[in-house]
Image (tube, helix red, strand yellow):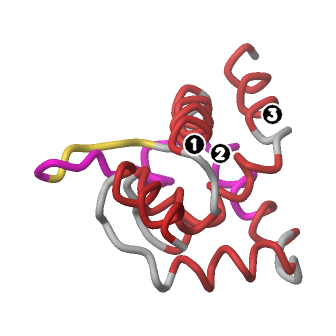
Amino acid sequence: MHNLVRAIKALSDETRIRILRVLMEKECCVCEIMQALDISQSRASRNLGILENAGFVKSRRDGLWTVHFIDVQKAEKYHATFIRAVKDALGDSKQVALDLERLKKVLRVGPAKVNQEKKSS
């Protein structure tokens, strides 16, 4: 029961739901999530950690990058149910539409470069 409660708590935050929705589209490193959601590196990392601890997100090394992804095959059965529910519930969300539009333009450049580009804009 403890794992189920942890999963439900992980979904109680808008940023984590938005991250989960982005990861439904493609696997991403932190810098890509930062760009897609227009959030800081610390906020992205903290919320990814919570999602990973709750069993929604997995990560693996890809060269210099740590790539985060959803692995429904190895997750608990209820994770897949929650993930489908999140996707269905966010179908007409303007915020998610904006996140997914930004996701199309993200670059795997690293947090320092993303922050530098924001300052010069």
Q: Residue at x 46, y 84 (%)?
A: 105
Q: Residue farthest to the left? A: 63
- Marks 2 and 1, how far apart at CA: 6 Å
Residue 56, disc: 1
Give the side of residue 39 with respect to residue 103, left or right: right
Labelled pair 2, 1 in contact (Cβ < 8 Å): yes
Closer to the chain start, of discs 2 and 1, is 1
- In the image, 14 versus 26, the foreground residue is 14
User: Mark 3 highlights which residue?
Assistant: 8
**Disc 3 residue type?**
Ile
Is 72 rendered above or below residue 3? below
**Numbered disc 2: secondary structure:** helix
Spot occupied by residue 19 in the image (x, y as percentages of width and height): 63, 55
User: Mark 2 highlights which residue?
Assistant: 79
* Label 1 packing within 10 angstroms: few (<14), some (14-19), many (20+): many
Q: Residue at x 74, y 26 (%)?
A: 4
Residue 43, disc: none
Closer to the chain start, of discs 3 and 2, is 3
**Numbered disc 3: secondary structure:** helix
What stretch of residues is rendered in magenta?
63-84
